[in-house]
Amino acid sequence: MKNILALFCLCIAFTSCKDEVKKETSETKKIVNSEFKNMLDTYYQDGLKLNPIAATFAGDNRYNDKMPNYLSPIYKAKQKAYYTNYKNILNRYKDEDLNETEKLSKATLNWDININLADLTFKKDLMPIDQMWSPHLNIGQLASGSGAQPFETVTDYNNWLKRVDGYLLWLASAESNMKEGIKTGYVLPKSLITKVIPQMAAMAEANVENHLFYQPIKNFPEGFSEEDKKKLTASYTTMVKDKVIPAYKKMHDFMSTTYLKAGRASSGISATPKGTAYYNHQIKKYTTTNRSADEIHALGLKEVARILSEMETVKKEVGYEGDIISFFDFVRNNKELMPFTDPQQVLDNFNTIHETMKPKLAELFDVTPKTAFEVRRTEAFREASASAEYNQGSLDGTRPGIFYTPIPDVTKYNTFSDEALFLHEAIPGHHYQISLQQEDPDLPEFRKTLWYSAYGEGWALYTESLGKELGLYTDPYQYFGMLGMEMHRAIRLVVDTGMHVKGWTREQAIQYSLDNEAESEASIISEIERYMANPGQALSYKIGQLKIRELRAKAEKELGTTFDIRQFHNQVLETGCVPLALLENKIDNWIAANK
């Protein structure tokens, strides 16, 4: 972290006159730095006002009663004005007046503003709901009382009542937008619509006391008066019965009839207006590079071939004599790799993995997070369509980072990739990277919560390769699981570009995955539909991982015996999320300074 704090130095002065000039320049620069810092803080604070849900997830509770209608023209105008205004302000600051940390902040903010302004030029809001990425799923987490929305005081409970009103306005606008999308050619594929319909049906559940939005009433904190409990119970009953259930029933009826009928048969985004241009934008947004779809597709094919070769080696090691595709089936259906009868056993297994690697962590990392960490089962209402995921802790550290794992059927839960999965989603993957970013006192606030998938997911995928260094992968099936997860990300380069640019169907993408990885067919179908819902996002993992691997190999080669893996990890992690070109520039400077 000392490298981030290193100030840009002036040349050493040799005369008292020059010393005086140096002092004056330094004083002037300090004022400029202060102004720049204040501008970054204001940018962050204005951003929280614009996106109060993000504030809640960051642990800032000032806006917990608010949810703007993100789909409204008024909100879109506010977004555009926000980014345009700060772009103009940012351009006033010259690099020569900033220290190294501030230069990186300026470059990062400039990139972020530009990509968000570009986002606003596309009509993606005419397809505002899908099975995995849309607000109705985040709101469900918050409504349950087990997410980032606090339910500790009477004010907290009342805040949620107000926020739900804002959410229901968004839900009504979503239906209006989808109707406009039907008219103009922006509509989801039928296969995705059929996955959303059950989600809406679950929220149209008529039994108020069993409803997800009623759950906080079943878990009042200690200290609430009987009068407060009575009032809140009445308010939440009215909210669920007269507002939430009718709204979801209306959305369910629309999606299961009008919208499903209009659903498109195509799989890729190129079938929508300006779809190819949108996909090129998504590539840049998610990989933070200027790579083309064709280049990424070719890279994916190359990586798939490389990893298949390594998988063949493991197949021989365990004594399996069939071909690699039959070995995939063998691993998928191996009952010895499905040992659990109770969901808690799955969670216990992840905690055991953590304990196994703890003694080795200090050899690779000398800076670790203060934020607490937990493993939890994914909530039932979204478990069927969910992937394993990490939810960050709050900025103040009071809410832990949480690794969620779906267990829809514990008897079919296959453990072969659990070690790699824990490294990626938990430690030292997302939990280390995100928590250290949030805890760093030297980063401006906007960078503490910034997320670039190529960096964040690239880091998490890179950490899967650290298993042997951390005392894991002693079981060849677990090492095969790591290769399987890397293969999964390599396949994404092929099928994502295949569907969205090269005309591949959903079925072609599913078959390609079945032919090259050991994931279950149900899991593969869910993944392919995930890529259909959010074009380009799936490319970020492998692109980021390959860049971090490349930078580590370069540092090891050029620094030789002086290379310290802990210091390399510090250099990567202390920047927080940045576009890959900025990370590469930072590591190159670090290598040059330490030769």
Image (spheres, rainbow, N blue to C red):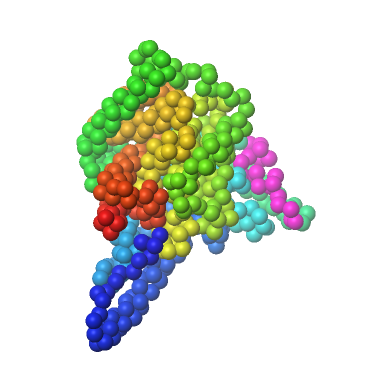
Q: Residue 357 placed where, x, y %?
A: 51, 39
Which image quadrant is residue 541 in?
Answer: top left
Q: Residue 487 placed where, x, y %?
A: 35, 30
Reply yes or no: does residue 217 show up in magenta.
yes
Q: In this view, does 85 lie above or below 206?
A: below
Q: Residue furthest front?
A: 561
Which image quadrant is residue 2 in?
Answer: bottom left
Q: Is residue 527 visible?
A: no
Q: Which residue is drawn at 34% across and 64% down?
A: 101
Q: In this view, does 352 lie above or below 113?
A: above
Q: Residue at x 38, y 22 (%)?
A: 314
Query: Does residue 58 appear to the left or right of 509 in the view shown?
Result: right
Q: Which of 363 and 78 is in front in this view?
A: 363
Q: Which residue is drawn at 32% across and 78% down?
A: 26
Q: What stretch is highlighted in magenta?
A: 206-224
Q: Which of 36 and 194 is in front in this view?
A: 36
Query: Does residue 370 appear to the left or right of 563 in the view shown?
Result: right
- Quadrant where the N terminus sits is bottom left
How many numbered marks appear?
A: 0
Q: Nearer the viewer, residue 118 or 447?
A: 447
Q: In this view, does 419 lie above or below 158?
A: above
Q: Nearer the viewer, residue 285 or 360?
A: 360
- Quadrant where the C terminus sits is bottom left
Q: Which residue lies furthest to the right in this view?
A: 226
Q: Which residue is drawn at 41% across and 31% down?
A: 482
Q: Can residue 440 be seen in this view?
A: yes
